[in-house]
Image (cartoon, grey):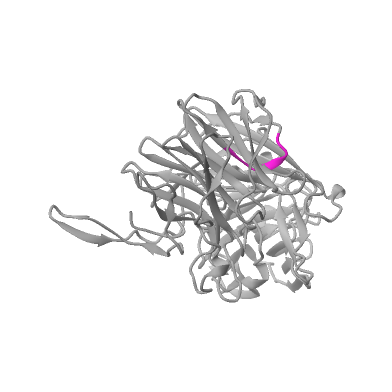
Amino acid sequence: MPYRNPIIPGFAPDPSIVRISDMFYLVTSSFHLFPGLPIYASRDLIAWRHIGNAIHRPTQLSLAQSGTKLNPLNDGTDETAPVTGGLYAPTIRHYNGTTYIVCTNVVYDPEKDSGDWVSGLTFQNFIVSTGDIGLGKWSDPVFFDYYGIDPDLFVDDDGRAYIAGSYWRPSPSCCISCFEIDLDTGRKLTEEKALWEGHTKVIPEGPHIYKRNGSYYLLVSEGGTHEGHCLTIARAPSIWGPYEPCNQNPILQPTATLDPSVYCHYNGHGDLVQDTQGSWWLVCLAVRRDRAGRMVLGRETFLTAVEWPEGQIWPRIQQPIPRMLWRRVPNGEHEEGISLSPPIEAVPSPFDPKMDLVWIRDPDLGRCSVSSDGRAISLLPLPTDLAQCTGESTAFVGRRQRRLDGSATADLVLSSLSGYIEDVRTGMAYYKDEHRYARITYEPAHGTLVFEVKNSAKSPAIYREKRAEVDLRRATKIQFRILYTGQFIHFMYQVEQAGERHGWNSFGLIDTLDMSSNDFTGPVIGVFMIGAGDKWCTFEDVDI
């Protein structure tokens, strides 16, 4: 199967995969974004399409407290690691006609944060299910009691179901533990039992259990989510152990040990799948990082081949993870040729152009209207700013940035603001969380445009602001544009008067390094409206 990596670009971490008949389905973490847990489908592991979201109703669960906790790195600097709450590391599995996803909703209460890595965090572990994954209607969550993250679901040959996860007592991610569960009620049927501390014994998490030739295999991500990130594996005669580690661990090496020019960095948190021809594959997260440390799109989903023939005890993963994989494929009746997949820049849905739109935390969908083609967005203002996580909704709608190089545009219709005398603000933003964003804002009460960039996770913290008064007396629209590359993000605007536009004005330029961190999320680009009032603000020709 020829392909280019990443197979799911842009803010697509912690992938889990399942094959149902001849179709592959993949789900990733979504953290503080709604809808949550995006689901992608493919017949060949190469061309993927976004077909739905497992958390697609605000009533399923609340993301109101999925704020970002700034944890100290303890590396001799004042830099922090942004740890965002919300939906962590799902696992997708299919059993007896039903597709299940198990996941953790990490809730962060800053008032209970005493400064260590654990304080202020609580965990809501749950199961959602559907009888028809293509239909896209998922159940309400069935919650179960587990003090940890990254649950895995394994159903044995006898139909008994087990949860394995990264246990957080007495310390974060101290081991992988397991218990039997009733999938219908979430009731624990056994006590939890520790299975394995991992190879490095550093933050074992993201477990997946497989059964092959009568043995139980436990695949674990460990070493932290960045420089030391790796995959290790162990096997046992029983699901309860004892687990014998592979003598070649880590089976996916941390990229810190490799040449810094490798294409993929920080690889780990993976899931194995077997195709219809019997070949094995690994999907995992990694980042594209340049030598200066820019990781523009955050953690993405990559694919690599796995050798695991019958009679071989341990799988062997192709590594370093390649930029592209070549494979001889039939070309005509008698010849073989080399084929390569086309570049993958995005994974749009052919079914619904609005499917990949996202809101921040819990949305107030009654204060947002999107046209059927996604090209017109109207917002009613809400008081919660992008810089806040108050538990209340923010009037923002956007999309994940899927390309390293591209642009986003939106036309603000000024007549839609004519009734506002309140101090409202509206515009276009490049957003990661409440501590890290850049935006261009129009303040109609003052006739002012504002460019702002903020990153409180850096040391020293980054904050810059630029203001300019704009003559809009005969203007009908302001067109906002964000032009982005692997190195820079350029904020621009132009004014439309009597149907004519008068050229782009450069308003702000930032280095993408200012927005890069060892974090969990990736950038989202969208439009927003902050303030109070009940008059719709409209953006036309939206291309984000």
Q: Main secondary structure of the magenta part?
A: strand
Viewer-side residue, 481 vs 270: 270
Viewer-side residue, 197 vs 509: 197
Give the extent of the magenta segment. 146-152
Answer yes or no: is residue 55 visible.
no
Viewer-side residue, 377 vs 190: 190
Q: Is residue 276 above or below residue 336?
A: above
Q: Position of residue 158 (x, y in %)?
A: 49, 24
In the rendered image, which quarter is residue 190 located in? Answer: top right
Check if residue 217 falls in the magenta segment: no
Quadrant for the C terminus in the image: bottom right
Quadrant for the N terminus in the image: bottom left
In percent of the image, x 61 and y 32: which residue is there? Answer: 127
Q: Position of residue 527 (x, y in %)?
A: 64, 56
In percent of the image, x 57 and y 68: which residue is there? Answer: 256
In percent of the image, x 25 and y 62: which residue is there? Answer: 338
Answer yes or no: is residue 211 visible.
yes
Q: Position of residue 398 (x, y in %)?
A: 60, 53
Left of 149 or right of it: where is 136?
left
Q: Position of residue 236 (x, y in %)?
A: 53, 39
